[in-house]
Image (cartoon, rainbow, N blue to C red):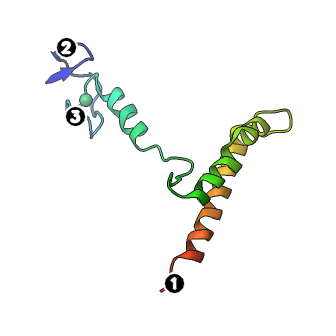
Amino acid sequence: MKCYNGNEFRTIKTTHGGGYGRCKWCHGSGCIACPGEVVKDAQRAIEPLFRADIENEDDLRLLKEYFGASAIQHAFGPDGDGINEIKYNAALATVLQEMRRCKHEPQP
Ligand SMILES: [Zn+2]
């Protein structure tokens, strides 16, 4: 089995059966590139906390309010809840954004 180990192509097969099914090098039969392919795919699957339209001033207002300097300082300050507060802010901003869109878009 030809496989890429990060530096060169080698003929290597892991002793344990079953690799990562979506590995582009071994297509699932198992190789040393499999763990790296798992990580790469996982990183691609990461969803953003909040999507803002840079052309939309209401979105920019939400960005400033929920992810601006004072929001970050509060989240990571003595009274803040750290990353959980950021996640909460993201959920809140997303709900407000969605409510605004529903209000402005024609309903079926
Ligand atoms: Zn592989």
Left or right: 57, with 65 as reference point: left
Label 1 element class: loop
Q: Where residue 31 sits: x, y (%)?
A: 25, 25
Task: Look at the numbered discs 2 and 3 and tell me whether their residues touch, using CB distance below 8 Å.
Answer: no
Q: Within 10 angstroms of label 1, few (less than 14), some, or many (20 or more) residues?
A: few
Q: Is mark 3 within 8 Å of ligand 1?
A: yes
Q: Where residue 96 sits: x, y (%)?
A: 65, 63
Corner quadrant of residue 74: top right
Q: Give the residue displayed 22% in from the left and 34% down from the top.
A: 24
Label 2 element class: loop
Label 3 element class: loop
* Residue type highlighted by circle 1: Gln
* Residue type highlighted by circle 3: Lys
Q: Where residue 38 sits: x, y (%)?
A: 36, 34
Q: Most extreme residue toward the right, as rendered?
A: 79
Name the quadrant of the N terminus.
top left
Q: Is mark 1 within 8 Å of ligand 1?
A: no
> Which numbered tag is attached to residue 107?
1
Q: Give the residue displayed 50% in from the left and 55% down from the top.
A: 53
In this orientation, which residue lies closer to the viewer: 60 or 77? 60
Q: Within 10 angstroms of label 3, few (less than 14), some, or many (20 or more) residues?
A: few
Task: Look at discs 3 and 1 and give the one toward the viewer.
Answer: 1
Corner quadrant of residue 61: bottom right
> Which numbered tag is attached to residue 24?
3
Task: Look at the numbered discs 3 and 1 and tell me whether their residues touch, using CB distance below 8 Å.
Answer: no
* Residue type highlighted by circle 2: Glu
Task: Indicate whether 64 appears above or below 73.
Answer: below
Where ligand 1 lies, by quadrant? top left
Q: Give the residue displayed 67% in from the left and 47% down from the top.
A: 64
Task: Look at discs 1 and 2 and give the one toward the viewer.
Answer: 1
- N-terminal label among 1 and 2: 2
* Residue at image mark 2: 8
